[in-house]
Image (tube, rainbow, N blue to C red):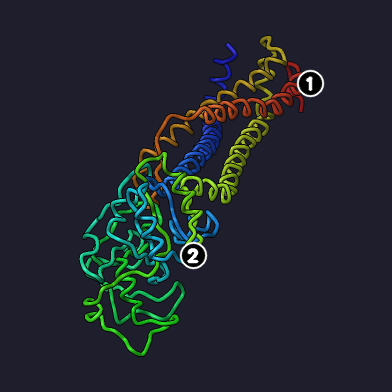
Amino acid sequence: MLFRLAFKSLLSRILTVSLTIFAIALSVALFLGVEKVRTGAKASFADTISGTDLIVGARSGGVQLLLYSVFRVGNATNNVTWQSYQDIANRDEVEWIVPLSLGDSHRGFRVLGTTAEFFDRYKYRGGRDVQFVDGLAFGDLFDAVIGADVAAALDYTLGDEIIVAHGIASFTEHDDKPFKVSGVLKKTGTPVDRTVFVSLEAIEAIHIDWQGGGRSQNTISAEDVRQMELKPKAVTAALVGVTSRLKIFGLQRWVNEYSEEPLLAILPGVALSELWSLIGVAETALVGVSIMVVITALLGMVAMIFSGLNERRREMALLRAIGARPRTILMLLTTEAALMSFVAVLLGVTLLYTGLFVARSHIDAAFGLYLDITWPTAREYIVLALVVVAGTAVSLIPALRAYFLSLADGMQVRN
């Protein structure tokens, strides 16, 4: 009886009730959306690199090594000599190893010297392969492969010329040895998108006539350099895969205790978790903002009920006249609030999953952020239940006001 009465009372004020429900539904959808983005961002961050057992570089901090080798942020404290790289590569535990050479840039994007094996060995998001949208890997000494963001930002296509700058923020260019775009990579949502890839031999070629950070007087042309044997002297870091996971820690200990030069080997997953803990304050801020939006919407519902109390005093007097007690009035208003909150939660969940279904592929393509469409988690179910409970609870404030008004008015409305 009370439920039916509350339902019909809401229908009689369908416009204001609908607006209130929609406001709460939007706040619920925002909160759940933030949760999806937060978990999706964390998962995408953790899956920036997968399938690599160790990252090796000059001894520094684990996060610093991860930042410059994977995220192309910052610089190495030192390089790893080619002899040390070969010593690691020749270890029985090593199944594969890919060198990384950083230091140059192109119009704000980092240039990475590596081998064609990088595109086979680098995995992301749980084992996905790096794929080419167009072209192939290095077929010529001065071929370059560009990430999706580089291609989009600079409007590059196959065959376009690239001039590599010496250093990160430098006006000195290797303009005597231009590169040609030979391949464009598919969007991954990782630092690969913002990288220009060249061969390790090409890195040696463009620096072969440089000394002390500047070009020497005896320049060597691009054609002459093709005839030379180009052997790297050092690399910045290396990605390593081992033959068995049981051998990871043994190889890591051997690298960290390497006597020829100070080296560091890190587990990418551990370093990624450490880095996420450092930047996780943004995650907390997102959750805090979405909670405040939900609270604001609930307060809006309270304001709506309050604003309608005077207009409903005649209704409450009529209910008293037919035998309703003051506590019935109180329960009526709380039931109305509970119904509005429940419908708003259902609508909010519907809006969220409809939005995810429509926009997921576009978000993945544009930002590399994969939002998995799954049933709400136990935590999210608890939050949804709390929204209904909170909506009912805050409605007690205007409901108590209505209770006392009904006591004062009795069966007549007093002005």
Report, in whole angstroms, how far the alpha carbon at label 1 lies from the one at label 2. Answer: 78 Å
Say above or below: 409 vs 272.
Answer: above
Question: Dot 1 corresponds to which residue?
Answer: 408
Q: Which residue is mark 2?
A: 76
Q: Residue at x 44, y 59 (%)?
A: 69
Q: Residue furthest front?
A: 259
* Label 2 crowd bin: few (<14), some (14–19), many (20+), radius 10 Å: many
Mark whose residue sits in front, 1 or 2: 2
Q: Determine whether the residue tagged by mark 1 lies in a helix, strand or loop.
A: helix
Give the amino acid type for the residue marked by disc 1 in the picture. Ala
Relative image position of residue 240 (x, y in whole percent) = 38, 51
* Residue 12 visible somewhere in the drawing: no
Looking at numbered disc 2 in the image, what kind of residue is underneath it? Ala
- SS class, disc 2: loop
Q: Position of residue 358 (x, y in %)?
A: 35, 41
Cβ–Cβ under 8 Å for marks 1 and 2: no
Residue 157: x and y in percent read: 25, 66
Q: Quadrant of the N terminus?
A: top right
Left or right, 201 with reference to 37: left
Dividing the picture into quadrants, the one containing residue 40 is: top left
Q: Residue furthest right?
A: 408
Please give the label number shown on residue 392: none
Relative height, residue 409 to residue 233 (above, below)? above
Left/right placement of residue 313 relative to residue 92 reads: right
